[in-house]
Every structure is written in structure tokens, then in C-alpha cells.
Amino acid sequence: MFSVGSAVNKYPDLNRKLLSKCKQYLTMFWTILGLTAGFVCISSFIPQMLKGYRTKKLDDLSYLLMSFMGSGMLLWILYGIHIDSIPVILTNVMGVCCNVLLFFMKVSYSNQKRTLTKAEQ
């Protein structure tokens, strides 16, 4: 009579190879899922950057928000390096870049506004 237990014991190398392949595919799945989640989160910066670029106005965007967000992302990068997680690292590097871009846009547009106001006086 054939039983599953006898097949498992009969081909241990095959079982190890199958288990190894399953682990590889699961790791790849979770990496792709993490990268997708990061891409979706980073995409949330795009509407704010586009609106700021079009209107040249980012007065409602708080420096404090950007400071906390940037600091948190830097800490996530360090954590991602510690746990060796590419999705965590990449997502937060892109997030810091978007945050820095928004920060410089805000500073630049605020300076332009002040210059225009002084010129009108």
C-alpha cells in the first residue's frame, strides 16, 4: 500500500528542493507585494507636487509635517538596512526624495511670494 509518509521518507532530497523553491517563491511574492505597497504610498505625493507646481503655492503644507515625515522615513531607511529589506529601503528613499522636493518647492514659492510682495510696495 502507498502512503504519503512513505513518499516523504523515500525522497528526502526532493522534498528539501521543493521546500526551498516554495520559500524562494514566497520571498519573491512578499518582495513584490512590499514594492507595490511602497509605490502606492509614494504615489500619494504626486498630486501634492503637481498642485504645488501648477499653483506655485504650498502655504497649507506644514514645515513641521515635512520634518516629522522626513525624519520618520530616514529612520525607516535605517531599519530597512538593519533587516536587509529592499522594499522598505527603496520606498523610504523615494519618500525622502519626494519630501525634500516638496520642501524646496515650498521654500522657493514662499520666497517668490515675498519678493513679489516687496516689489509691489
Image (tube, rainbow, N blue to C red):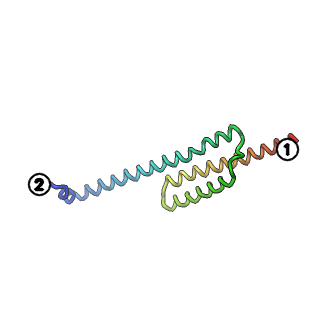
Dividing the picture into quarters, in which one does residue 19 lie?
Answer: bottom left
Locate residue 112 relative to residue 68 in the image: left or right: right
Q: Say what amino acid the circle numbered 1 marks.
A: Lys
Picture residue at 28% right of the left edge, 57% below the top: 16
Picture layout, residue 117 above or below residue 11: above
Q: Residue furthest left?
A: 1
Where does the image place residue 116, in percent across and percent down from the top left?
82, 41
Where does the image place residue 34, in percent across and percent down from the top left?
47, 50
**Are there few (<14), some (14-19), or many (20+) residues within 10 Å of tag 1?**
few
Q: Secondary structure at mark 1?
A: helix
Q: Mark 2 sits on what residue?
A: 1
Q: Mark 1 sits on what residue?
A: 118
Picture residue at 42% right of the left edge, 51% below the top: 30
Q: How many marks?
A: 2
Picture residue at 64% right of the left edge, 39% below the top: 50
Q: Which quadrant: the C terminus?
A: top right
Locate residue 40 relative to residue 107 in the image: left or right: left
Q: Say what amino acid the circle numbered 2 marks.
A: Met
Q: Secondary structure at mark 2?
A: loop
Q: Residue furthest right?
A: 121
Which label belongs to residue 72?
none
